[in-house]
Amino acid sequence: MLLSGFGGVAGVTEQLMDKGSFSYRHDSVNYVEIDANNTLREERINTNIARIYLVDSNNVQLQVQAHITVTDQAGAPVAPFMDNFLITWVDSYVVRVNGQPFMTLNNQLQQSISAPATAASGII
C-alpha cells in the first residue's frame, strides 16, 4: 500500500514542536500523524530496543516506503528490517518524509539519581 497525499510535510522543516517523550521502560505506544491516512508509531520491544513503523487509518501496519527514511545522529541511515526501523536508547534519530525532517527522537543524555532520603544533594 502506498502513502497518500503528504500535503504540507515539506513545510515541517520550519519548526518541529515537542510532542512528548518515548520511554523504553513502558509499554505505551507513541504516535505522530503524518496525514489522515498515515501514522508513525514508536513502540518498545525491550528496555534497549524500540521500533518505528507506519500504520494506515485502520491501524494496519504498512510496508516501509522509499520516501520515509531514518538516520542516526551521525547521519548514518537506519535500514528497515521487516517493515520496522529498529532504534536504541543510546542514539538520537531523525525520521524524514520526502527528504524533509518530519520527526526527531532525541536522546536526552540524563540519568535519575537515587540516594538515601537523609543524604544531602543538589547541583553545584
Image: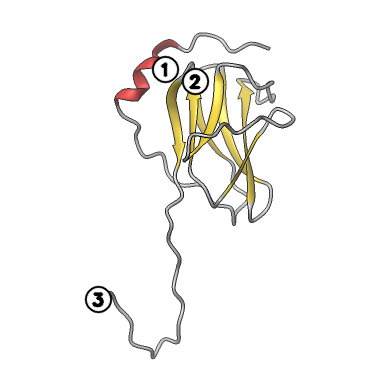
* Structural crowding at the residue carrying mark 1, measured as other residues with C-alpha within 10 Å and reported as few (<14), some (14–19) or many (≥20): some
Find out whether the residues at labels 2 and 3 contact each other: C-beta distance under 8 Å. Answer: no
* Residue at 68 percent of width and 12 percent of height: 1
> Marks 2/1: CA distance?
7 Å
Q: Residue under circle 1?
A: 9
Earlier in the chain: of badge 2 and badge 3, it is 2
> x and y percent of residue 91 in the render?
52, 47
Check disc 3 and report its element: helix, strand or loop.
loop
Check disc 2 and report its element: helix, strand or loop.
strand
- Compared across the picture, whether 116 is left or right of 80 comes to left
Q: Residue 97 has which mark? A: 2
- Which quadrant of the structure image shows residue 86? top right
Find out whether the residues at labels 2 and 1 contact each other: C-beta distance under 8 Å. Answer: yes
Q: Depth check: give the residue in front, 77 or 38.
A: 77
* Structural crowding at the residue carrying mark 2, measured as other residues with C-alpha within 10 Å and reported as few (<14), some (14–19) or many (≥20): many
Q: Residue 124 has which mark? A: 3
> x and y percent of residue 54 in the render?
62, 26
> Marks 1/3: CA distance?
43 Å
- Compared across the picture, whether 52 is left or right of 74 comes to right
Q: Residue 93 has which mark? A: none
